[in-house]
Image (cartoon, rainbow, N blue to C red):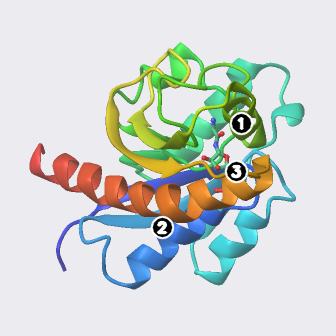
């Protein structure tokens, strides 16, 4: 069997982006990568059920069970190393990782963000808040971005972006759904394959 990049997906919530990755793998699109592990920082995340249904190994690592952020991150690092993970995908993972963490995995962590970076991104811009900000600013086009993760929140090199139209009468919820359907669920799997392939070729 062809060698594949071992991928861990870090999640906190519903996991629709994880589902897009699972469906992409099932359909044969993830030729260079294998979804090998899902880590959640929330024990109640529905993403964990999605992983289990797809037969992917899961781990729950909760911040509140650790004395400080450093110990919490060390626990994640240990789990990633034990599972020989080569690529980390943040898919709705609502914790900002420290420089200590990100510097261990240069250009090996990718994140999906629900706006066209550099708009509506950085600390405090996550989930529905991003769409609320886009609507209140009044932009007519938004979208999603997949980027590498470094020490600057949402500041790493951009891998893929896709624009999405804003329509009259949009609510944050309606816009979130459109951005997911038209952009996130498409560019995240595409980027996962692109980076997995590059990692295999660079070995
Ligand atoms: C997605 O829209 C993702 O882009 C966003 O949270 C949602 C998670 O949904 N991530 C961020 O805002 C990160 N800054 P999901 O759990 O259904 O994939």
- Of residues 27 and 56, the one nearer the viewer is 27
Q: Give the position of the C terminus as an image quadrant.
A: top left
- Of residues 142 and 100, the one nearer the viewer is 142
Mark 2 → mark 3, Cα distance in angstroms: 31 Å
72 over 32 or under it: above or below: above
Of label 1 and label 3, which has the lower sequence position? 1
- Which-is-in-front pick, marks 1 and 3? 3
Q: Which mark is residue 135?
A: 1
Who's the residue at 58% across and 43% down the image?
A: 114
201 displayed left or right of 77 = left
Q: Is residue 82 visible?
A: no
Q: Dot 2 surroundings within 10 Å: few (below 14), some, or many (20 or more)?
A: many
Spot occupied by residue 166 in the image (x, y as percentages of width and height): 60, 48
Of label 2 and label 1, which has the lower sequence position? 2
- Which-is-in-front pick, marks 2 and 3? 3
Q: Which mark is residue 168?
A: 3
40 over 140 or under it: above or below: below
Mark 2 → mark 1, Cα distance in angstroms: 28 Å
Spot occupied by residue 20 in the image (x, y as percentages of width and height): 52, 69
Mark 1 → mark 3, Cα distance in angstroms: 10 Å
Residue matched to label 2: 21
Spot occupied by residue 100 in the image (x, y as percentages of width and height): 52, 16
- The answer to the question of whether label 2 and label 1 lie on touching residues, with beta carbons closer than 8 A, is no
Q: Quadrant of residue 5?
A: bottom left
Who's the residue at 42% across and 19% down the image?
A: 103
């Amino acid at each position: 069997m062809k060698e594949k990049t071992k991928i861990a997906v870090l999640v906190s919530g519903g996991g629709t982006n994880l589902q897009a990755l699972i469906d992409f793998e099932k359909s044969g699109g993830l030729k260079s990568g294998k979804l090998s592990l899902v880590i959640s920082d929330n024990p109640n995340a529905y993403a964990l059920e999605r992983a289990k249904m797809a037969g992917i190994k899961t781990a729950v690592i909760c911040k509140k069970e650790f004395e400080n952020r450093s110990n919490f991150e060390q626990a994640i690092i240990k789990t990633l190393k034990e599972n020989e993970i080569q690529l980390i995908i943040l898919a709705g993972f609502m914790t900002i990782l420290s420089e200590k963490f990100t510097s261990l995995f240069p250009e090996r962590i990718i994140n999906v963000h629900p706006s066209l970076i550099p708009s509506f991104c950085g600390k405090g811009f996550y989930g529905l808040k991003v769409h609320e900000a886009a609507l209140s600013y009044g932009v007519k086009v938004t979208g999603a971005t997949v980027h590498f993760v470094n020490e600057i929140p949402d500041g790493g090199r951009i891998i893929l972006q896709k624009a999405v139209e804003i329509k009259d009468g949009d609510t944050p919820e309606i816009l979130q759904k459109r951005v997911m359907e038209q952009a996130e669920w498409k560019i995240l799997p595409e980027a996962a394959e692109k980076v997995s392939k590059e990692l295999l070729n660079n070995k």
